[in-house]
Structure formats: C-alpha cells, structure tokens
C-alpha cells in the first residue's frame, strides 16, 4: 500500500486548532481503512505532541505517532487555507501527519521523518508546495517518497 494517495490530501482546509487537525487526520486515515483503532491512534498523536511540539519551521507541522491503532504506514497532507497557531511561537499552514504501525516503529518511522526533513529544507520543494493547485500537483511532490 502506498504511503500517500489523493484521498490522504486535503487542500484549502478550514481548521482552527490542533484538535481539529488531529480529528481530520484520523478521518482521512479511517476513510482509507488505514486504522485499526481511531481512538488509540488519536491518543498516541496527542501523547507524542505533548512530548514536544512538532512544528520545525517553514510553516510546517509534522505530527506523528507510532501506534498499535495503525494498520498501514501513511502520510496525510493538509494544506490549510489560513495559518493556525501550532505553538505560542510557531504558525503552520502545511500539516504532514505520519501514522506508522508500532511494529514498523523503528526504520519506517525514521525513514519518513528523514525524507520530509530533507524535502522541507529545499527551497524548490517549498516553492513547488506553494505553487501546487490540485491534489495531483501535491502528490507529484512525493513521487520519490520511497526512494
């Protein structure tokens, strides 16, 4: 199963806070049959966020969790219509939510985080992300995701 597909991308989203983001991530994953247990994954997302904020800059948030509630490693992309406050000092407009089954916690989880970190650091990726207009445009930015 691919890590991301068009059904896991939501553009022009009107979300007002982290709670709405996390619920939306779960909705998208659940609709694609990628969760065993929504509440368990949601709990694990909140627990990870409490350990330390997941907004590394560039208007990105990378909420993630390794969870027994996840069936398949997945990446959800949400492009917010307007920035929202992720922390007291960090506003975000792009959410890259990572869901990984606990049994794949080590390598797969780090592989996805590393790939996203490398992409975020590249100016051309950030420009392409900003220029993207359709789900296909966004998906194209991740064609090398499993390399």
Image: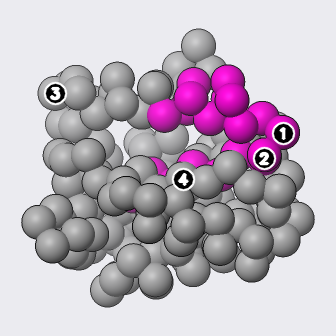
Sequence-wise, the earlier of marks 2 and 3 is 2
Residue 59, image x, y percentages: 20, 54
Q: Nearer the viewer, residue 63 or 136?
A: 63
Q: Nearer the viewer, mark 2 or mark 3?
A: 2
For numbered disc 2, what is the local secondary structure?
A: strand
Vertical position of residue 116 compared to residue 7: above or below: above
Q: Residue at x 39, y 77 (%)?
A: 18
How far is disc 4 from disc 1 in space, using C-alphas? 15 Å
Which dot marks residue 101? 2
The reply to whether residue 9 is in sight is no
Instruction: Tell me which numbered mark, 1 or 3, is placed earlier along the sequence.
Output: 1
Q: Of label 4 and label 1, which has the lower sequence position? A: 4
The Cα–Cα distance between marks 2 and 3, rounded to whole angstroms, is: 31 Å
Q: Are marks 1 and 2 in contact (CB under 8 Å)?
A: yes
Per the image, the residue denoted by label 4 is 64
Q: Residues within 10 Å of mark 1 (few under 14, many from 20)?
A: few
Q: Earlier in the sequence, mark 2 or mark 4?
A: 4
Q: Which residue is mark 1?
A: 103
Q: Secondary structure at mark 3?
A: helix
Q: Residue at x 63, y 44 (%)?
A: 4
Callout 2–callout 4 Cβ contact below 8 Å:
no
Spatial CA distance of label 1 from label 3 is 34 Å
Residue furthest top in the image: 147
Query: Start and end of the magenta stretch?
Result: 95-113
Q: Is residue 47 magenta?
A: no
Give the left or right position of residue 31, taking residue 141 as reference: right
Q: Position of residue 32 (x, y in %)?
A: 78, 62
Element marked by disc 4? strand
Q: Which mark is residue 123?
A: 3
Q: Quadrant of the C terminus?
A: top right
Q: Residue at x 57, y 80 (%)?
A: 23
Disc assigned to residue 1: none
């Amino acid at each position: 199963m691919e890590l991301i597909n068009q059904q896991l991308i939501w553009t022009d989203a009107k979300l007002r806070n982290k709670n709405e983001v996390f619920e939306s991530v779960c909705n998208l994953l659940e609709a694609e049959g990628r969760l065993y247990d929504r509440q368990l994954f949601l709990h694990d997302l909140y627990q990870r966020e409490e350990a330390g904020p997941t907004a590394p800059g560039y208007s990105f948030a990378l909420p993630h969790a390794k969870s027994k509630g996840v069936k398949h490693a997945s990446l959800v992309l949400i492009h917010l219509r307007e920035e929202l406050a992720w922390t007291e000092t960090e506003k975000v407009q792009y959410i890259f939510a990572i869901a990984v089954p606990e049994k794949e916690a080590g390598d797969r989880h780090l592989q996805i985080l590393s790939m996203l970190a490398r992409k975020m650091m590249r100016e051309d990726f950030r420009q392409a992300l900003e220029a993207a207009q359709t789900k296909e445009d966004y998906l194209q930015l991740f064609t090398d995701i499993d390399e």
